[in-house]
Amino acid sequence: MKQLLKTNKITLTVVIAMISFLLFSCKKQEKVVPDPPHIIKLEIRGSTVNDTLQFVKSGKVIAESGKSEGEFGMNLLLTLDEPEAEIQIRKKGQTDILATRKIVADKFEQVIRCYYNGEKAYDETILLKFKGYSGSSTLQVLMDGRVICEGGNSVYYSPSEVNIGFEPNQKHQIQIRNKATNAILLTKEISGGEAIQNLRFYFDGFKVHESINFPKPSNPANILFTAKFTSALDVYNGPIDIVFFSGISTTKLYEHTATNIRIEIPTDGNFSQAIELPPAEKGITYSYKLVKRGTLNDLPYILTNELMPIKPESSYRIVDFRAGYTLMADIMDRKNVRTSGITKGTSFSVIETDIKFFFDN
């Protein structure tokens, strides 16, 4: 009996040992050799202002923008031991982190972007182009309260375009401000997504127009003409009319013959009634002259104190005839005095700005 119990005890011990062996054998064993590092191809794109940028991974610089101004781009191969890693972006020679970007191990080709404007680093950028006219008024374009563009007084806006950075889902506020009065004339928002965007506008002295409905001539062979006039001269003595002339293209404008087409220019700064000019005969061109209201040739200026002779070409301008076109002319004037030489004398020039130009592509 004792022998049987001893045998059963041994058998039970063996069974327990076998079960324990099987249980521990089923557990996942640690790998002797870890997974090899992942290799990724990283493309870095962006732009910077005034500073060289460094891209840092695990405390080591892996790339530099290479220059402190303008766009940059570089490609490199990296190894990742972990599922993901962080790229830190800083200015060269400094430790403060401007921004971070994440890269992952399970994707071979990856792109990170950084657009640094001198103050902040952004994920995305757009090119905002300016095309505006404001006559004698100087206007400023502001982004989030900061002036980014300025122009006026018959000068195109400068710079003509700027890069603007965006964070995900971010919007920027754009304003147009009268520099002399600080009055805000336009407020709008822009967002990312569209790589190239345009800010087109015309300031008529009262308000900013982002779009204008340009009427077309009823006859596509004609040109439609409308105008407004602002004088910057202290000898101006308006109001004025515009009288149209025609003549051989090779002759002086003041030798042209007056037509029966005349328009009155409003004194309130608005555009005149539109008229249509039919095509001229071959070899004939149209011109127009600014004259004192109701006259044919009298200049709208006080000339009693002028010492130099008044040149006969004063206040004339040729018409750039284009069939089917609408010429919306914002007209200013300029006084030119030459005191010596064979061309000495005083003349008054017509400065014409075609408003439609600023809204055409």
Image (cartoon, rainbow, N blue to C red):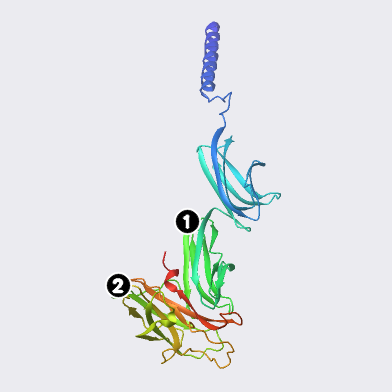
Which callout, 2 or 1, points at the residue further toward the start of the chain?
A: 1
* x and y, in percent, of residue 101 in the image: 57, 47
Judge whether residue 31 can be spotted in this image. Answer: yes
Q: Is residue 180 left or right of residue 109?
A: right
Q: Which residue is mark 2?
A: 221
* Residue type pointed to by label 2: Ala
Check whether the beta carbons of the residues at disc 2 and disc 1 lie within 8 A of each other. Answer: no
Q: Is residue 125 left or right of residue 339?
A: left
Crowding at dot 1, Cα within 10 Å, few <14 / some 14-19 / many 20+, comes out as few
39 w.r.t. 235: above or below: above
The residue to which callout 1 is attached is 195
Which label was assigned to residue 233?
A: none
Judge by depth and name the residue closer to the eye, 352 or 122. Answer: 352
Above/below status of 89 relative to 328:
above
Q: Label 2, label 1: how many angstroms apart (C-alpha)?
A: 38 Å
Q: Is residue 140 visible?
A: no
Asked if residue 188 lies left or right of residue 214, the reply is right
- Give the position of the C terminus as an image quadrant: bottom left
Q: Residue drawn at (55%, 16%), measured in percent from left and top? A: 17
**Total marks placed:** 2
Residue 337 image position (x, y, % from top left): 58, 82
Q: For numbered disc 2, what is the local secondary structure?
A: loop
Callout 2: 10 Å neighbours few (<14), some, many (20+)?
some
* Residue 59 found in image quarter: top right
| Spot occupied by residue 259 in the image (x, y as percentages of width and height) | 35, 84
Please, what secondary structure does the residue beneath circle 1 have? loop
